[in-house]
Image (tube, grey):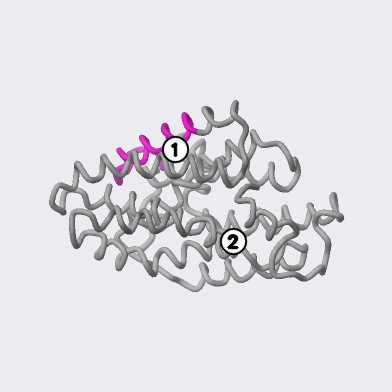
Amino acid sequence: MSLKHLTKDLTSYDLLKTFAVIFMLVDHVGYYFFDGNDWLRVAGRMCVPVWFFLIGYARTRDLGPKLWIGAAILVAASSVVGLGVFPVNILGTMIIIRLVIDPVMKRALMGPQAIWQISVMMILLSFPTSYMFEYGTLAVIMAMFGWLVRNQHEIPHGERLTQQYFFFSLATFVIIQTMFFGFEQNEIPVLGGGILLVMCMLMFFRPLTLAGTGEGIKGVLLAPVRFMGRYTLEIYVAHLLLFKALGAMIDPERFSLFDWKLVPEGMLEMAVSGVN
């Protein structure tokens, strides 16, 4: 049963997901309403590792109908406002990762070099796959990091491997996102420093319940945190539907209603150049 039904007290999951939701909203405000403002997109990168880390970190691989329905609704909404079908939204990426992460990790732990061979393959596939589903195989790398953090004490040399993968996934994420978005030189240190802090937070993440935070005045004051932490899927779908509708109203040239296409304008050119 979900934590949202088990306790009124805040959990470490609530705090981490609230952090991710806030930076996600900043990112999408930048994309939909301040096109060309790279600083908002830089800030938005802070949420990305969290979502995929949590999939790898989780003990379950839930593929409930809400996830599929949410992904389908957003694919349809993107098509309606001329953003195309591909890349499939992050909910589709999450579905893929939940299907593949355990088999990938089983093979990655078959030998001392296996995890690095698989990870290099994920890097090589990251750009072509990112035009099929959001973040492509870079998302798998971040989920692999989450899996290692959760299981590091249950595998041989797990702590050392997790430390090594911390630096590998950090560098990989910053480099690939810099290339994909074409961030400027003054933006790269901010991106790198921010992602370093996020990765440190993830490295030391543990499931905790903060006793006494669900009752009385604390419960009332912290209700927004509890809401954002426990209804991330609903928030994701609802705010994107709103943003797409507003985008079509404010900037009809960019978000053109019923201009059906498989990929958004410029996507093929980006695929060739490797930058956004």
Q: Where is residue 160 in the image (x, y as percent from the top left)?
A: 19, 41
Q: Does the magenta stretch include residue 116?
A: no
Which residue shows up at 64% across the image and 51% down it? 273
Distance between the Cα atoms at labels 1 and 2? 48 Å
Quadrant hosting residue 181: top right
Dots 1, 2 in contact, CB < 8 A: no
Q: Which region of the structure is painted magenta?
A: 192-214
Q: Residue 74 carries which label?
A: none
Q: Residue at x 50, y 45 (%)?
A: 176
Estimate how packed mark 1 is, as few (under 14), some (14 to 19) or many (20 or more) residues with alpha carbons within 10 Å.
few
Residue appearing at x 83%, y 64% in the figure: 257
Answer with the quarter of the image where residue 134 lies. bottom right
Residue marked by disc 2: 131
Secondary element under disc 2, as helix, strand or loop, is: loop
| Amino acid at circle 2 | Tyr
Q: What percent of the width, then of the height, locates residue 159?
A: 19, 43
Query: What secondary structure is found at the residue carrying circle 1?
Result: helix
Q: Would you say residue 12 is visible in this rendering?
A: yes
Asked if 106 appears above or below 163 in the picture, the reply is below
Residue 250 vertical position relative to residue 39 in the rendered view, above or below: below
Residue 90 visible, this orientation: no
Left or right of 164: which side holds 125?
right
Q: Position of residue 246 (x, y in %)?
A: 79, 53
Residue farthest to the left, as pictured: 156
Residue 175: % across, % down: 49, 41
Instruction: Relative to 232, say whether 216 is above or below.
Output: above
Q: Give the label on residue 216, or none.
A: 1
Of 274 and 17, nearer the camera is 274
